[in-house]
Image (spheres, rainbow, N blue to C red):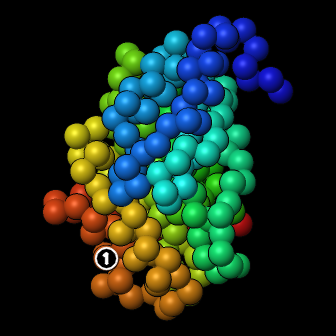
Amino acid sequence: MDNTKNIRKSILNKLTELEDYQVEKHLVISEEIIDIICEITEKTGKEVAIYVDRRGSVISTEIGDENTVSLKSVTKRRGEESLSGIRCVHTHPNGDGRLSDVDFSALKKLKFDMIGAIGVQDGEMKNCQLGFLCPTEEGDMGFAAAGPYTKEKLLKIDILSTIEEIEKNLGTQFDPVIGKKFIAFVNDIPEYIYGDIVD
């Protein structure tokens, strides 16, 4: 299905141009990119996904429909047990920045460094939730979700240190202290949840 049908060329060009952008590598995403993908989502009513590597390079973009964007496998993985080396941030046109079951399934299947959902309302970021892989008490792969964040809070997160900490502990037995360290990347730790992902 072609999700770009009936979308103005100027909007598609703006999305494609994001692939030349560089994000400060410690940031989840830049404020400029947030503003652009929220604008595109508002104008099209569709989800937009951005893929960023650990150097901060935007390596790919994607546009979905009003409910989902087909999150694709993009990887710079160094080994089977490591993460993909890619973080994915996408928009939710309904204004709800909470990650969905589909988002968490994609996180596990594609082994993203991190997945983020931005709720868009009136062309602006309303809130954002981030998701990370982590081991469960049973030793399986589960997830930790953090947020929701305001834009101001999101732009203060040192995501690279968090990703490195997560990858260091993947494959280890779950420990509540380790689990808390996974998402302790801001001074004021927000409410968070742990959950298992079922195939």
User: Which residue is outermost to the bottom?
Assistant: 173
Q: What quarter of the picture does the N terminus occupy? A: top right
Closest to the observer: 124 or 139?
A: 124
The percent coordinates of residue 9 (x first, y second) are 67, 10
Instruction: Identify which residue is drawn at 72% across, 54% down.
Output: 73
Instruction: Identify which residue is drawn at 52% across, 82% down.
Output: 170
Closest to the observer: 32 or 162?
A: 32
- From this viewpoint, is residue 114 visible? no
Determine whether, in the image, residue 123 is placed left or right of residue 78.
left
Query: Which structural element holds mark 1?
Result: helix
Instruction: Identify which residue is drawn at 31% across, 75% down.
Output: 180
- Residue 129's place in the image compared with 162, above or below, is above
Determine whether, in the image, residue 130 is placed left or right of residue 158.
right
Q: Please rate how many residues cluster around mark 1, counting C-alpha atoms within 10 Å: few if below 14, some from 14 to 19, many from 20.
A: few
The percent coordinates of residue 101 (x first, y second) are 58, 51
User: Which residue is outermost to the left?
Assistant: 187
Q: Which residue is mark 1?
A: 181
Determine whether, in the image, residue 135 is placed left or right of residue 105.
left
The percent coordinates of residue 192 (x first, y second) are 33, 62
Question: Which kind of residue does numbered mark 1 sit on?
Answer: Lys
